[in-house]
Amino acid sequence: MIIGCPKEIKVHEYRVGLTPSNVHEYTEAGHKVYIEHDAGSAIGFSDEDYHRQGAIITDKEKLFKESDMIVKVKEPIEEEYKYFRENQILYTYLHLAADKPLTQMLLDKKIFGIAYETIKVRGMLPCLAPMSSIAGRLAVIESAKYIQKTFGGNGILLSGIPGTQKGKIVIIGAGVVGLNAAQLAVGIGADVTILDIDTNRLAYVDQMFNMRIHTLFSSRANIINAIKDADAVIGAVLIPGAKAPKLVKKQDLQHMKTGSILTDVAIDQGGCFETSRPTTHNDPVYDVDGIIHYCVANMPGAVAKTATLALSDQTLGFGLKIASLGAKEAALSDVGIYEGVNTANGKCTYKAVGEALGIESVELKEAL
């Protein structure tokens, strides 16, 4: 199979879908790999590094025209749609539940769209987990930064110092994002509360942190009470493949302290705060009713080297199987890849995406 890895063009997106060592693995398995010129140069992977591992360095147009499978990091944006051709395989983060135009392009061109974020193995999401870990930790770092008075925040140091109150961080969701956010928040000395609807998960969190953080069941009343005193609220909820539920409403902002911050890690899936809208690293925050909002849709892109290495470690094995067997056979022989297929042969094959966008979805076997 011919594998193509283009350069990411989203604002301040420096990650790359394949590392030079990944290229080595694909070429050793008998595949041909095209890398777009300067695809990894921003994080220290030169064209020569890729060439030494067997890659062919080329331009975007030739790469898309000749490649059977496109390996990316971020979902394609509108200016990339024209490069795709019918029946290609696209292996990347897709987040289709919040992106009907992209979904329609994939359906129109009969793209076999395999989404990192819905590949599931033994109940876990292995290709999503590394970026969730990074985003969770960055959420605390970015909250601590943009709550500073110079950015319009309330001027609280989340760690506090002796003789002052600690900043209060509320984390909604105790999954991978929430747990990593809690680890960093506790590490800097903040006063941390975490909410979730799974009481078993809360019991685990309580034990993990040796009762150093507050745990609450994620009811509507508990969320409102928790955010009243919060300096930073981190949205960390996930329903695989589906739109995130809106857990903090616009009217709830009136209960929050002026200059506090909402950091929405679920923004790729539509966001879990009603007032959330995607932002970029160029212009990451905005104000609604005196509350700072941080909603950058590619947070891990800020630490692109670490993020690329962590992501490619998880995606490589599935990618090699797809390249060796073809998308259809790989999906039918691997339940994880089967779960990852969101579009095939012009059909939406992931129920949660169909429900979110109001389009028909079918079982993958039916689409094939």
Image (cartoon, rainbow, N blue to C red):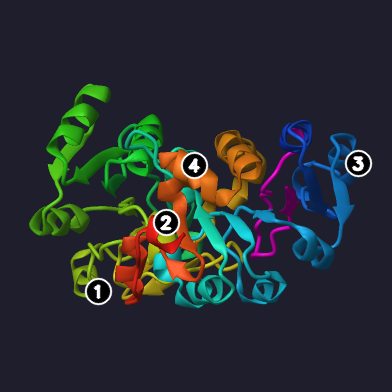
Indicate whether residue 364 is drawn in magenta: no
Q: Amino acid at mark 3?
A: Glu
Query: Which residue in the protein does label 3 denote?
Result: 48
Q: Secondary structure at mark 4?
A: loop
Name which of mark 4 and mark 1 comes first in the sequence: 4
Q: How many marks?
A: 4
Query: In the rendering, at what x and y percent does residue 27 appear?
Result: 78, 36
Disc 2: which residue: 147
Which amino acid type is shown beneath numbered disc 2? Ile
Residue at image mark 4? 127
Q: Which range is magenta?
A: 1-21
* Front-lying residue, 23 or 157: 23
Q: Which residue is mark 1?
A: 250
Q: Quadrant of residue 86?
A: bottom right
Could you tell me residue 355's position as x and y percent? 29, 69
Q: Specify few, some or many for label 4: CA neighbours under 10 Å numbering under 14, 14-19, or 20 or more.
A: many
Query: Residue 26 occupies which quadrant of the picture?
Result: top right
